[in-house]
Amino acid sequence: MTKTASIASAAAAEASRRSFKVLPVLELAVLAIALVMPLLLQDYLTVFATRVLILAIFALSFDLVWGYAGIMSFGQALFFGAAGYGAALLARDLDIASMLVVLPAGILIGLVFALLLGGFLLLGRHPSSVIFLALGTLTGSYAADRLARGWYYLGGQNGIPSIPPMTLGSSDFTEGPVFYYLVLGILCVVYVGCRFLVRSQFGLALAGLRENEQRITFFGYKVQHLKLIVFALGGAIAGLGGSLYAFHEGFVWPNILGVVISTQVVLYVLFGGSGTLIGAVIGAVVIEGVSFWLSDNYREIWPIILGVLLLLVILFRPSGLVSLVLSERERVGSFGRPPKGGRHGAP
Amino acid sequence: MFNDQFKLSRRRFLSSFAVTTGAIATGAGSWVFPAGWANAAAGPIKVGIATDITGAMAYAGNADTNVARMVVKEINDKGGLLGRPIELYVEDTASNESVAVGNVRKLVQREKVDMVLGGVTSSMRNAIKDPIVARGKTLYIYPQLYEGKECTPYIFCTGPTPAQQCDEFIPWLIKNGGKRFALPSANYVWPHTLNAYARKLIESHGGEVIFEEYYPLDQVEFSSTVNKIISNKVDVVFNTIIPPGVGPFFKQLYEAGFLKSGGRLACVYYDENTLNINQPEEIEGLASCLDYFKVLAKDDPVSGRIQADYDKQFPGKFLLAAGSAATGTYRGLKLWEAAVKEAGKVDRESVAAALDHAKIAEAPGGPAEMVPGKRHCKMNMYTAVAKSGTYEIVARSQGLVDPKEC
Amino acid sequence: MDSVLIAAFEILSFGAIIVLVTLGLGIIASMMGIFNFAQGEFVLLGAYITYLGATSGLPVWTGMLAAPFIVGAFGFVLERLIIRRFYLAPIVAMLGTYAIGLIIRECIRGLIGGRYISVSEPIGGSLDFGDVHVSAWRFVIIVVTLLVMVASYLLLARTTFGLKIRATLENPALARASGISTSAIYGSTFAFGAALAGLAGALVVPVFTLFADLGIRFLIQGFVAVMVGGIGSFAGPVAGAGVIGVLSAALPWVMAPVIADVLVFVLAIVFIKFRPQGLLSGRRV
């Protein structure tokens, strides 16, 4: 009887805690800060902030794939870079720089590459091990990097420079507050989309997948297909980020396909806290921001500090920065309607 | 040996920077060299240098920065430019294009410099020219030998072009090396375009290109290339592989007996700085064609003075050498000085208009003049051969050579 | 005929390098079930120590001799402090060792300033077999690799220590019950794997020049080789390394180097997909 009593009291405590959700507060706070940024920063720093936001979109794609579907994709940059190159080629060879073509093209490229790679790695008679997925995606990214480095049509080592500004109708998107708000808008749309996804029935299946993959399989869910869908979506979002990046920076080069950028996004999400979406954004902002701020004095040491911090996070706080304010329950999320009263009708 | 020469690590370089001239670090990879005096009314003229202080091209970038410091100090000591001191802002492009773009943006948007000089490899130039010229609306001077075809307005090139490097050089190679050429190259824009130009010249002078191949920049395994060269009895290896691959490549070629059986190496960016990458016997007889070699300092008093000044101020291992854009940097800054003096103003339009036809009488290797309308520079060219670790001049151009660009 | 001999020689020497790197990775993966993402940086560390030795005025080979021991010791300490926390969670191990690798790589990048530094080999020049000239140093690499492999095999198959290792590999619980200190075995194994990487780095640096990103290429090749060869045995990683090394070195002779580079990885991944256990799986020497 004591066991039931303790469960009941725990549920009651939960119910009272449940009434204050940290996550929406956190998200709104971040949004508010992001909205006023350009007003507070000089033009040159707004350009930097835009770049960070694009990287945050990229980080979201990885969080979706790893935090929600458990796929350790060490090669997200493949989709990011491929879309970047696609956008650059559209601008260079076909003179197309219109936002209405380029951004959907980026999404499509990311989606297709992710379907192809994910299909190959995930589908098949035997479910693939996590290590195999990690290695397969890492290899994909590395191979794409080497290929782009060797293919002169893609510019070889040089990459493709001098990409013209993105256009909408007759106006250009040059760097600065305008581009910033555009990216912020896109980031918000992507974020809300992801949020809906992971709180939907589909997201429920994903949550079950994370908890116990075998059991979900026995329930009849095609786990590999679920993973593939998430992987493809992740690829699409990474592609969107990639095409934005190409037009914002004005050039693409083989490194944006490669291992360093792939693992950088892993860092962002790990640092911020995987499986929370906002963690990915915060991780990207914090790491890029601190790196920029420190680069003025400690650029050589900062990567070392970053590595040490990362190691500490992995050892002692694997749920990342966000776990400092967000409880594990909120991270996993609740589905369905909360039960009336204080009964232990936990989801 | 290469590693001996580079005992001057980046840290020591930084401290020597700060100690000798009171540089202010405004960031790792960013320095300001303020003049010793100020002009209260108009403020200083700001010159930005964006070059590879770290990375594979560090041997060139550091030499260029040194030259810039030397020239700016000389100008400031004589009262500055238009009565205003010149402030030098240095950013590290780190042989990494995306870092470079970020740092160049700092120069243009934060420091708001009046002119940017820099970039070593063509890929670096391509990456940074947009932020400088198009988005940043600033004048850009590119000081390094390159493949030509850079005709963007407001970009002025003061390094040798393929016409200047190859027109006399290839015939000399055919006469002093042989007719069978191999073109091993790094895979980026400079070798591709240069090879196209060289191939036309080789074939029109009766030579033959046996093969032309492109390798990734970090490739260090060249056994199949070396084998192709030996088994096809190539006479001249017209090399455009750049560091880090060039050292292992020449070494592997030497070990396979290429030089012993009479082959000749040719490399148009090889200068005193790169001599140290290999052992002297591995590059014996290597021919290069540049706008300046240190040995000229003995005959030409102007070159002698400039070389002596540089060696006194910067006695380290970054040498004033033409394949490292150092002479192009000197030329670029002096031509720009002349243009600003003529224009009387520092804004881009006026300076560009004056720079279009600027001339200087004193530069390493001889005078230099911009070709009006072309934004490229006429200069003397010299062919030299590496012997026991130094160069020996074997041919000179007859007067200033036309760059034949744009 | 000469070309074939030269080609065979170059392929062998390149394969030997990959074998050295992969052996360490494979042993760690087989024994402790974790993928050491810092293995490439151990190679880098070995190369760096060799460079330090060469520039400090001592003969080059002192640095080369010292490198495996120093890196092995470093690996041992690392295992005691950090790595052993990862044994139960392979993903965390990957990330954790990646972070360690990042720290090592950036430290060395800061120390050598992003340059490409060449270190000369202790035995330079070429050996001449008739008309065929081969690099003497590459020959040394092949010889050393063979010696190391033979020594490792003898260690595992013929000594008591090797017996303990094999016991731990086969059944850790039973080994512990029999009185073998598995934690000491794990420590030694990790140190051994690190030492092998250090040796590879020392041998390879005259060929490849020293630069901060040296480790990354070896890491990926090593991983692919281990998965192709199969985890769980000594011969597996060696077989995998042999295949990958030979393919990587041989293909550029018949096709453009960049396609060869990519093709090796693509083929390897496809192979692993259809034969996840690799070439030789199972727990044996």
Image (tube, coloured by chain):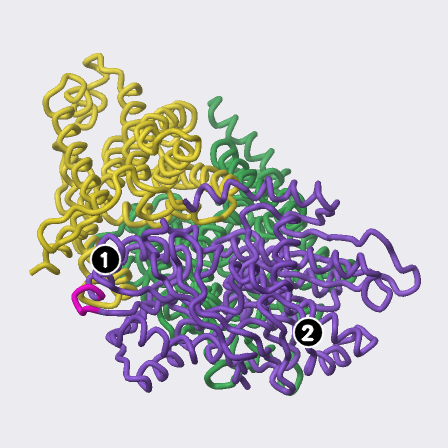
Chain colours: A green, B purple, C yellow
For the point 87% across and 65% down, the residue is B83
The correct choice, above or below, for A110 with respect to A173 in the image is: above
Magenta highlight: main SS:
helix
Q: Earlier in the sequence, mark 2 or mark 1?
A: 1
Label 2's element?
Answer: strand
* Residue A346 shows in this picture: no
The quadrant in which the N terminus of chain B is found is: top left
Circles 2 and 1: CB distance less than 8 Å? no
The boundaries of the magenta stretch are: B229-233
Q: Answer above or below: position of A31 versus C82.
A: below
Q: Is residue C219 magenta?
A: no
Residue B260 image label: 1
> Could you say where residue C96 lies in the image, as x and y percent from the top left?
43, 37
Total numbered badges shown on the rendered structure: 2
Q: As rendered, which of B131 and A179 lies closer to the eye?
A: B131
Q: Residue most toward the left? A: C1
| C248 relative to B111 in the view: left or right | left
Cα distance in 3D space between marks 2 and 1: 44 Å
Residue where numbered disc 2 is placed: B360
**Tag 1, which secondary structure?**
loop
Asked if the stretch drawn in magenta spans residue B230, the answer is yes
Note whether B234 is above or below C102 in the view shown. below
Q: Position of residue B157 (x, y in %)?
A: 59, 74
- Say which residue appears at 29% left-offset and 23% top-offset: C188
Give the chain of mark 1: B
Q: Nearer the viewer, residue A281 or B250?
A: B250
